[in-house]
Amino acid sequence: MRFLLMTTGDPQATAAPLDENLMIEMGKFIEEMTQAGVLLATGGLDPNGIHIKNSGGEITVTDGPFAEAKEAVVGFALIDVRSKEEAVELSKRFWKIVGDGEGEIRQVFGP
């Protein structure tokens, strides 16, 4: 089962330099998941983004940033695990390393 773990929040609020110990612990966590074959991809996302909308055949493209920046997806990890519960446990481990914050877990369907 694949899941997309997303961190949400205002990218400006999280722009502070990261603690060296946090970086070491996160590196160990990422290495562990990579070695286990669980971590498929990870990365940060451009907070500006582009919004695209199709309404009645008319396509509108709008450049960001958007008003709801505090709820923007700013980072992600794509994982392949045996169950939803395992995805939740990995997400809990991530939040114990990074501290306060919010995110979402979504199952990825398809081939």
Image (tube, helix red, strand yellow):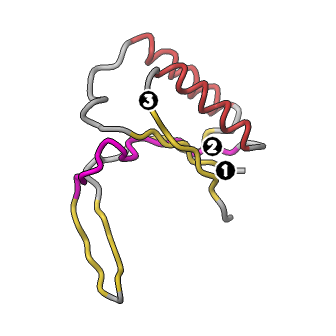
- Residue contact at pointers 3 and 2, CB within 8 angstroms: no
Q: Does the magenta stretch include residue 66?
A: yes
Percent across and percent down for residue 53 are: 34, 74
Local SS, label 2: strand
Amino acid type, residue under disc 1 in the picture: Arg
Secondary structure of the residue carrying tag 1 is: strand
Residue at 28% over, 20% down: 17
Q: What residue is pinned by disc 3?
A: 101
Answer above or below: position of 37 versus 106. above
What residue span does the magenta drawing correspond to? 64-80
Residue 37 x/y as whole percent: 69, 38
Which labelled disc corresponds to residue 2? 1
Determine crowd level at label 3: few under 14, some 14-19, many 20+ residues with C-alpha closer than 10 A.
few
Q: What amino acid is at disc 2?
A: Ile
Residue 4 painted magenta: no
Q: Is residue 100 left or right of residue 89?
A: left
The relative height of residue 38 versus residue 16 in the rendered view (above or below) is below
**Quarter of the view holding residue 12:** top left
Read off the residue under disc 2: 79
Dot 3 falls on a residue whose secondary structure is loop
Q: Which of marks 2 and 1 is nearer the N terminus?
A: 1
Closest to the camera, between mark 3 and mark 2, is: 3
Q: Residue at x 64, y 31 (%)?
A: 90
Question: 9 and 31: which one is in front?
Answer: 9
Which residue appears farthest toward the bottom when viewing the image? Answer: 57
